[in-house]
Image: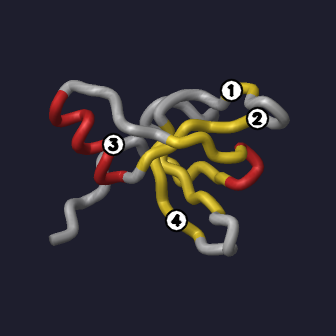
Amino acid sequence: MAIEEGSRLEAVTASGELVQMRATGAPVRGHDFPVVWVCTEQEYNRAQANGGHPKAIPWPLDAVRELGSHEASPVVR
């Protein structure tokens, strides 16, 4: 599967922590290396509900892996 808008990703932070994110588009060429723009699940769902675009940040492509389904994760309260 190719990463595209809505892809669920597991991203490695600078400290080595694994965090789940959503891709806001396909990977692109960054200044020095490929990146994928990502946001949190909460931000992705907020944008989807409001018909807007999520606030995203670039993440190194080699620090993410695709988790699979594009379906929304269950809401945790």
Determine the CA span between mark 1 and mark 3: 19 Å
Q: In this view, does 34 lie above or below 17?
A: above
Q: Quadrant of residue 55?
A: top left
Contact between labelled residues 2 and 4, with CB atoms less than 8 Å apart: no
Side of 50 where 47 appears, left or right? right
| Other-residue count near label 1 (Cα within 10 Å), few / some / many at <14 / 14–19 / ≥20 | some
* Residue depicted at x 26% and y 26%: 52
Q: Is residue 74 above or below residue 51?
A: below
* Identity, as a three-letter code, of the amino acid under mark 2: Pro
Q: Mark 1 points at which residue?
A: 28
* Identity, as a three-letter code, of the amino acid under mark 4: Val
Q: Name the residue under label 4.
A: 19
Element assignment for label 3? helix
Pick whichever of labels 4 and 2 is earlier in the sequence. 4
Pick whichever of labels 4 and 3 is earlier in the sequence. 4
Determine the CA span between mark 4 and mark 3: 14 Å
Q: In which quarter of the image is residue 13?
A: bottom right
